[in-house]
Image (spheres, grey):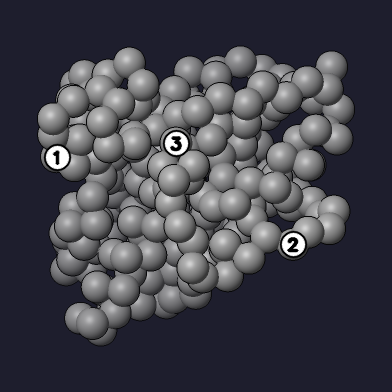
Amino acid sequence: GNIVIRTPCSAVGHGSMYHSQSPESFFAHCPGLKIVVPRGPKQAKGLLLSAIRDPDPVIFFEPKVLYRHIFENADGDVPIGDYELPLGQAEVVREGTDVTLVGWGTQVMRMQAAADRAAKEGISCEVIDLQTIIPWDVDAVEASVKKTGRMIVTHEAPSTNGFGAEIGQKIQERCFLHLEAPIQRVCGWDTHFPYAFEEVYLPSVARLQDAIRKTMSF
């Protein structure tokens, strides 16, 4: 039935292994569930209202950093009235021509920062926020990759069996003849989440920047 389960997720700076995981791939294996991860307050409200009114059960992951982060751009301007953001529809946060960056939740902020750095090197990145993991907007990602010819998927969860592998496989299937370089993943490491060195574990802006350079020089 139409039930929404709200739950915190992802790194917050000091949560260690019991409070910082990103378990979306666990629930992605449960047929019938929808999985949502907003990147900011504006998206959180619109997606949550859609989830509440959706006839299917929804798990609404809330990255804990969002509870404390101060948004000074358009994402922080939350309309007072009622509005919905459709589930299963990605948003192109930033248009580009050279490489497609795909992620969700607070990882979108890191992608945008990496895109800013890449722009200084003459590299144009398209940034896509999936917003919904199940169902995910494969058509939007496919259209972007057919334009750029390159894709990097990034998430805080470990790389092995992370949802990025599903995205990469599907895009490889649909865009094989359009790819200029192998699809890359920039993810958390396959280890327990550390307490003292969260930034070392996380898929940082620097790691994303290295992946962008690598895929552009392939």
Distance from label 3 to label 1 (Cα)? 18 Å
Q: Residues within 10 Å of mark 2 (few under 14, many from 20)?
A: few
Q: Quadrant of the C terminus?
A: bottom left
Q: Residues within 10 Å of mark 3 (few under 14, many from 20)?
A: many
Nearest to the observer: residue 4 or residue 181: 4
The kind of residue on which mark 2 rests is Pro
**Which sits earlier in the primary sequence, circle 1 or circle 2?**
2
Residue found 18% across the figure and 42% down from its top: 199
Q: On residue 200, which mark appears?
A: 1
Distance from label 3 to label 2 (Cα)? 22 Å
| Residue 63 x %, y % | 47, 38
Can the viewer see residue 149? no
**Which sits earlier in the primary sequence, circle 3 or circle 1?**
3
In the picture, measured across the screen, residue 203 lies left or right of residue 90, that is left
Nearest to the observer: residue 148 or residue 83: 83
Q: On residue 79, which mark appears?
A: 2
Q: Is residue 117 above or below residue 80?
A: below
Hey, which quadrant is residue 10 in on the image? top left
Q: Residues within 10 Å of mark 1 (few under 14, many from 20)?
A: few
| Residue 195 x %, y % | 18, 25
Under tag 2, what secondary structure? loop
Can the viewer see residue 39? yes
Distance from label 1 to label 2 (Cα)? 36 Å
Q: Quadrant of the N terminus?
A: top right
Residue found 27% across the figure and 19% down from its top: 17
**Which sits earlier in the primary sequence, circle 3 or circle 2?**
3
Q: Is residue 120 above or below residue 127?
A: below
Under tag 1, what secondary structure? helix
The kind of residue on which mark 1 rests is Val
The residue at which mark 3 appears reads as 64
The kind of residue on which mark 3 rests is Lys
Query: Closer to the camera: disc 1 or disc 2?
Result: 2
